[in-house]
Image (cartoon, grey):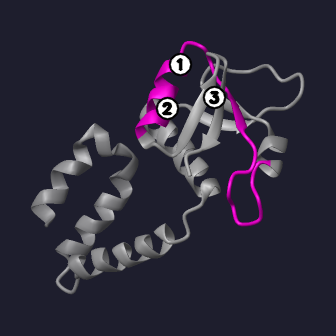
Amino acid sequence: MIRHLKPKVKNPQYSHLKNELRRFLEIGRKARGNLEQRLIEIKKINEEIDQEVNDVRNLFDLLENIKIKLKIDSRFIHENECRKSNFIYMYQSDIEKGFDSDGNQIKPLAMLVNPKKSASIIEIIKETGLFLIEGTEEEIVLHSAN
Protein backbone atom coordinates (compact mmCIF):
# COMPACT_ATOMS: atom_id res chain seq x y z
CA MET A 1 0.00 0.00 0.00
CA ILE A 2 2.91 2.33 0.77
CA ARG A 3 4.30 1.76 -2.71
CA HIS A 4 0.98 2.93 -4.12
CA LEU A 5 0.63 6.03 -1.91
CA LYS A 6 4.22 7.34 -2.03
CA PRO A 7 4.13 8.60 -5.68
CA LYS A 8 0.83 10.41 -4.98
CA VAL A 9 2.57 12.79 -2.52
CA LYS A 10 4.53 14.38 -5.38
CA ASN A 11 1.67 14.34 -7.87
CA PRO A 12 0.23 17.90 -8.29
CA GLN A 13 -3.25 16.41 -8.71
CA TYR A 14 -3.16 15.35 -5.05
CA SER A 15 -1.48 18.48 -3.64
CA HIS A 16 -4.53 19.28 -1.49
CA LEU A 17 -4.16 15.83 0.14
CA LYS A 18 -0.40 15.96 0.62
CA ASN A 19 -0.45 16.14 4.45
CA GLU A 20 -2.98 13.32 4.76
CA LEU A 21 -0.98 11.11 2.39
CA ARG A 22 2.16 11.73 4.44
CA ARG A 23 0.32 10.73 7.62
CA PHE A 24 -0.82 7.51 5.95
CA LEU A 25 2.77 6.77 4.91
CA GLU A 26 3.94 7.33 8.50
CA ILE A 27 1.26 4.96 9.82
CA GLY A 28 2.23 2.32 7.25
CA ARG A 29 5.95 2.54 8.08
CA LYS A 30 5.52 2.10 11.84
CA ALA A 31 5.99 -1.43 13.17
CA ARG A 32 2.63 -1.25 14.95
CA GLY A 33 0.98 0.89 12.31
CA ASN A 34 -2.03 -0.68 10.67
CA LEU A 35 -2.74 1.39 7.57
CA GLU A 36 -5.45 -0.95 6.34
CA GLN A 37 -7.37 -0.65 9.63
CA ARG A 38 -7.07 3.15 9.52
CA LEU A 39 -8.44 3.25 5.96
CA ILE A 40 -11.35 1.02 7.00
CA GLU A 41 -12.15 3.45 9.85
CA ILE A 42 -12.07 6.40 7.45
CA LYS A 43 -14.35 4.55 5.04
CA LYS A 44 -16.90 3.97 7.83
CA ILE A 45 -16.83 7.65 8.77
CA ASN A 46 -17.31 8.62 5.12
CA GLU A 47 -20.28 6.25 4.77
CA GLU A 48 -21.92 7.81 7.84
CA ILE A 49 -21.43 11.29 6.41
CA ASP A 50 -22.82 10.21 3.02
CA GLN A 51 -26.05 9.16 4.72
CA GLU A 52 -26.52 12.77 5.89
CA VAL A 53 -26.19 14.32 2.43
CA ASN A 54 -28.48 17.27 1.74
CA ASP A 55 -28.43 20.33 -0.51
CA VAL A 56 -26.42 22.44 1.97
CA ARG A 57 -23.71 19.79 2.03
CA ASN A 58 -23.84 19.59 -1.77
CA LEU A 59 -23.32 23.35 -2.02
CA PHE A 60 -20.26 23.24 0.23
CA ASP A 61 -18.92 20.22 -1.66
CA LEU A 62 -19.41 22.08 -4.94
CA LEU A 63 -17.63 25.21 -3.65
CA GLU A 64 -14.77 23.08 -2.31
CA ASN A 65 -14.51 21.28 -5.67
CA ILE A 66 -14.28 24.63 -7.49
CA LYS A 67 -11.68 25.85 -5.00
CA ILE A 68 -9.52 22.78 -5.55
CA LYS A 69 -9.83 22.58 -9.34
CA LEU A 70 -9.87 26.27 -10.29
CA LYS A 71 -8.25 27.91 -7.25
CA ILE A 72 -11.33 30.15 -6.88
CA ASP A 73 -12.52 30.71 -3.33
CA SER A 74 -16.02 31.76 -2.29
CA ARG A 75 -17.35 34.37 0.11
CA PHE A 76 -20.40 36.42 0.97
CA ILE A 77 -20.77 39.71 -0.86
CA HIS A 78 -21.42 42.89 1.06
CA GLU A 79 -23.12 45.98 -0.32
CA ASN A 80 -20.82 48.37 -2.19
CA GLU A 81 -17.97 45.87 -1.99
CA CYS A 82 -15.46 45.86 -4.82
CA ARG A 83 -15.45 42.33 -6.23
CA LYS A 84 -12.22 40.49 -7.00
CA SER A 85 -11.87 38.14 -9.95
CA ASN A 86 -10.62 35.15 -7.95
CA PHE A 87 -13.77 34.76 -5.84
CA ILE A 88 -17.29 33.44 -6.20
CA TYR A 89 -19.64 35.76 -4.36
CA MET A 90 -22.96 34.73 -2.85
CA TYR A 91 -25.55 36.70 -0.92
CA GLN A 92 -25.76 35.69 2.73
CA SER A 93 -29.53 36.19 2.69
CA ASP A 94 -29.81 33.70 -0.22
CA ILE A 95 -28.02 31.09 1.86
CA GLU A 96 -30.06 31.82 5.00
CA LYS A 97 -33.42 31.78 3.19
CA GLY A 98 -32.54 29.27 0.49
CA PHE A 99 -32.65 26.12 2.62
CA ASP A 100 -35.20 24.57 4.96
CA SER A 101 -34.38 23.21 8.43
CA ASP A 102 -33.45 19.82 6.93
CA GLY A 103 -30.90 21.41 4.59
CA ASN A 104 -32.95 21.02 1.42
CA GLN A 105 -32.88 23.87 -1.09
CA ILE A 106 -36.16 25.78 -1.29
CA LYS A 107 -35.06 28.86 -3.30
CA PRO A 108 -32.59 29.40 -6.15
CA LEU A 109 -29.10 30.57 -5.17
CA ALA A 110 -27.19 33.21 -7.10
CA MET A 111 -23.42 32.96 -7.57
CA LEU A 112 -21.72 36.12 -8.81
CA VAL A 113 -18.64 35.17 -10.82
CA ASN A 114 -15.99 36.68 -13.05
CA PRO A 115 -17.33 36.40 -16.64
CA LYS A 116 -13.92 35.17 -17.80
CA LYS A 117 -14.14 32.20 -15.44
CA SER A 118 -17.84 31.41 -15.70
CA ALA A 119 -17.43 28.76 -18.40
CA SER A 120 -15.00 26.78 -16.24
CA ILE A 121 -17.23 27.12 -13.19
CA ILE A 122 -20.30 26.01 -15.15
CA GLU A 123 -18.38 23.01 -16.47
CA ILE A 124 -17.53 21.89 -12.92
CA ILE A 125 -21.13 22.39 -11.76
CA LYS A 126 -22.34 20.23 -14.65
CA GLU A 127 -19.65 17.61 -13.93
CA THR A 128 -20.79 17.18 -10.35
CA GLY A 129 -24.47 16.94 -11.25
CA LEU A 130 -25.36 18.36 -7.82
CA PHE A 131 -27.22 21.40 -9.17
CA LEU A 132 -29.08 22.54 -12.26
CA ILE A 133 -27.95 25.92 -13.52
CA GLU A 134 -29.20 28.94 -15.41
CA GLY A 135 -28.15 32.56 -15.63
CA THR A 136 -25.62 34.78 -17.35
CA GLU A 137 -21.84 34.99 -17.51
CA GLU A 138 -21.79 37.14 -14.36
CA GLU A 139 -24.54 35.44 -12.37
CA ILE A 140 -25.04 31.70 -12.21
CA VAL A 141 -28.27 30.54 -10.53
CA LEU A 142 -28.26 27.13 -8.83
CA HIS A 143 -31.29 24.87 -8.44
CA SER A 144 -31.22 21.58 -6.56
CA ALA A 145 -30.86 18.57 -8.84
CA ASN A 146 -33.05 16.50 -6.49
Q: Which residue is mark 3?
A: 87
Residue sitting at x 89%, y 22%: 80
Give the percent coordinates (x, y) of residue 82: 79, 19
Residue sitting at x 51%, y 46%: 130
Q: Which residue is mark 1?
A: 117
Q: Element at badge 3?
A: strand
Where 60 sits versus 3, above or below?
A: above
Left or right, 18 with respect to 123, comes to: left
Instruction: Farthest residue to the left: give it.
Output: 3
Marks 2/3: CA–CA distance: 9 Å
Which quadrant is the N terminus positioned in? bottom left
Give the percent coordinates (x, y) of residue 111: 68, 31
Marks 1/2: CA–CA distance: 11 Å
Viewer-proximal residue among 8 and 101:
101
Residue sitting at x 19%, y 58%: 5
Q: Which residue is mark 2?
A: 71
Q: Element at badge 2?
A: loop
Give, as a single range, the part of the protein colored magenta. Answer: 98-127
Left or right, 132 with respect to 21, comes to: right
Q: In the rendered structure, which amino acid carries the disc numbered 1? A: Lys
Q: In the rendered structure, which amino acid carries the disc numbered 2? A: Lys
